[in-house]
Amino acid sequence: MRQISYVLKYNLINLQYKFYKMTEENFQKRIDAEKKIEPKDWMPTDYRKHLVRQISQHAHSEVIGMQPEGNWISRAPSLRAKMILLAKVQDEAGHGLYLYSACETLGISREELVQQLHDGKAKYSSIFNYPTLSWADMGAIGWLVDGAAIVNQVSLQRTSYGPYSRGMVKICKEESFHQRQGYEIMAEMAKGTKEQKEMAQDALNRFWWPSIMMFGPQDSDSPRTRNAMKWKIKRQTNDELRQNFIDKTVGQAEIIGLIIPDKDLKWNKERGHYDFGEMDWNEFWNVVNGNGPCNKQRLAHHRRVHDEGEWVRNAAKEYARKQELVKSN
Amino acid sequence: MAENSDVWEVFIQNKNGLAHKHVGNVHAYDKVMALENARELYTRRNEGSCIWVVKATDIVSSESEDSEAFFDPSNDKMYRHPTFYTMPKGSKHI
Amino acid sequence: MSSLFTYTLRIADSSLILGQRMAEWCSKGPTLEEDIAMSNISLDLFGQSNGFYEYAAQLDGSKSANKLAFRRNEREFFNHQLAEQENGNFGTTTVRNFLHDAFNLLFYTQLSSSKDETLAALAAKSLKEVKYHLRHSSNWLIRLGDGTNESNARSQEALELLWQYTGELFEMDEIDNELLNLGIGVDNTALKTQWDEILNKTLKKAKLNRPEDGYMATGGKKGMHTEYLGFLLAEMQFLQRAYPDAKW
């Protein structure tokens, strides 16, 4: 009897495996045919896991990013600058919301996602673990950080998962004013007083390398890239996107008279791209793993705000519950 | 944390005369908040003249397993489209 | 300084200071959605203040809107003291905004018929925004008042704290009277009855008690403020003061 049940079990598992392989083949065929995968479609467990990780970390980045930029709203040096910065940071909150929504279609709640952030299980873009120390940082962030985000997000518009792709299209439409806002600040300061020009150059010096590190580890050090490319979650590799961004940005710095802090930056005629210097991968991994200047501060702020808001959310929930009771009576 | 809010799907009419379009969703605790949150998130750039919000749990969707039975039968009834018909050469306004 | 100039500054200052307070909530909202809502309110208020500052700058001729916002000292700011009160918790903010929004709705409604065309136009535009602000703060006041015991207690506490700043809203001084006689300004005292109606109706829905009228603060319109304004201005004006020759 035991032998028969083993045989049955083996056949069942074999059958399930064959079925899985067949549906996985169909799934890959859809990917290869540039068809979008929607929430109700079958998808490999790893595809779902990968997306939850990537989309939620993207969402967390938008929200955490509100902190370093929000730092200068109260001190913005003109009415116009204040309104523009506030509108920009507000957009980031909106982007976070679009992305949390897209992530929730994969069967996870926003509450769980926030818990993952607080537990350190989910990460966010390391760039936001650097402090914003002067008004010029608002320029550097808009120009470089949003600039890098745009390069990444334009590419992601063609990602295979429908809700993520549609979220990216929406975000890209809104993102371009962000970069222009930053570049305008840098341009004005670079041709302003001596102190303004120094402030702008200082901001560029501090934000250049962290910005190009936003594209992640080199392809050779990125084990996740293979699946991400196969499943068309990513459409271009880290190194491709990084090169794209650098090529675009060098000329922009030259026009406004600021110097990119990379002595190895040089146009390579054969490659048709800029050669650039070696990144400090020690610093990169340190900051990714929690040892940057602001990691603890950013998370502590997020946790504190979340806790302080609990009584408000409870009140809203309780009020809604009471209204439902009144309606049903 | 027992303060999970509800998910509401949002439909926006851009201009008078156009149909409402699905733009995404918001979290909110009641329908008044849902409308306001939808306004804040989806109409900051001149995109709205009317907003509908519907609790996600109230939406009924066709199932992907039923797609064939639901939709394929209409794919082979080309006589429902005007392009199916050959009109006499030179005829106008038809 | 003409009376019209001062009158316009008063409106601009209240909008700017309240806008600055609301901007402080960025990245600190109880939900992400409410964060966006409060930023929108702040942007409306900054936009309003900008409009009134531009007009004031025209009237004066020698200063720009930015100079008016960033180079005046506390004694030269004429906002209501209510506007500069700290955000505190979400309850304090909601109560402060509700008290001010209800007044602004009535004030801008009257100002929309001002004989001064610019003030009338600015008021009409602001009125649309204030209608939404009042709706927003009223709805939240009701949710908090009729929510949990804790939210009711916090809102009641906020009401008691801020009540003394409501008297100033309905005062008329010589500048108010001068402009009222010219058909340009608003009769603030006449707004009290309607304001009471809005208050009483909303507080009833929110299951909150209207505080007794006791000591009423005054002086904002003459440049006398609470301890909070100095800190707010120091932060807001820092860059322009530190780099006086820079253009931003």
Image (cartoon, rainbow, N blue to C red):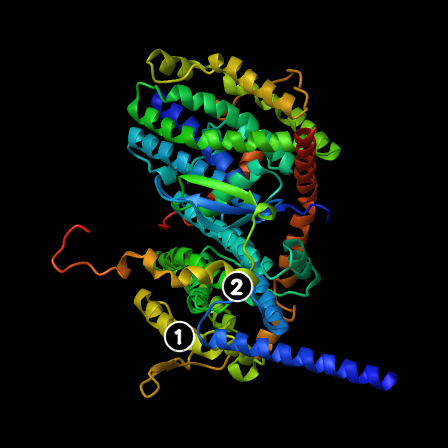
Q: Residue drawn at (52%, 80%), measured in percent from left and top?
A: A218
**Does residue A156 lie above or below A238 as drawn?**
above
**Which amino acid, mark 1?**
Asn
Q: Which disc, if any, is residue C2?
A: none
The chain containing the residue under callout 2 comes to A
Q: Secondary structure at mark 1?
A: helix
Q: Residue drawn at (75%, 32%), measured in percent from left and top?
A: C149
Residue A321: name its quadrant: top right
**Does residue A224 lie above or below B45 as drawn?**
below
Q: Quadrant of the C terminus of chain A?
A: top right
Q: Which disc, if any, is residue A38?
A: 2
Please give the residue where the numbered disc 1 appears in the rendered image: A244
Mark toward the viewer: 2 or 1: 2
For marks 2 and 1 on the same chain, the one whose residue lies earlier in the sequence: 2
Q: Secondary structure at mark 2?
A: loop
**Distance Cα–Cα, label 2 vs label 1:** 30 Å
Whether residue C21 is visible to the viewer of this picture, yes or no, is yes
Whether residue A77 is visible to the viewer of this picture, yes or no, is no
Is the same chain shared between marks 2 and 1?
A: yes
User: Residue C2, image x and y in percent?
Assistant: 33, 22
User: Residue B17, image x and y in percent?
Assistant: 34, 40
Q: Residue drawn at (37%, 27%), measured in percent from left and top?
A: C124
The chain containing the residue under callout 1 comes to A
User: Residue A70, image x and y in percent?
Assistant: 52, 51
Q: Nearer the viewer, residue C57 or C182?
A: C182
**Which amino acid, mark 2?**
Glu
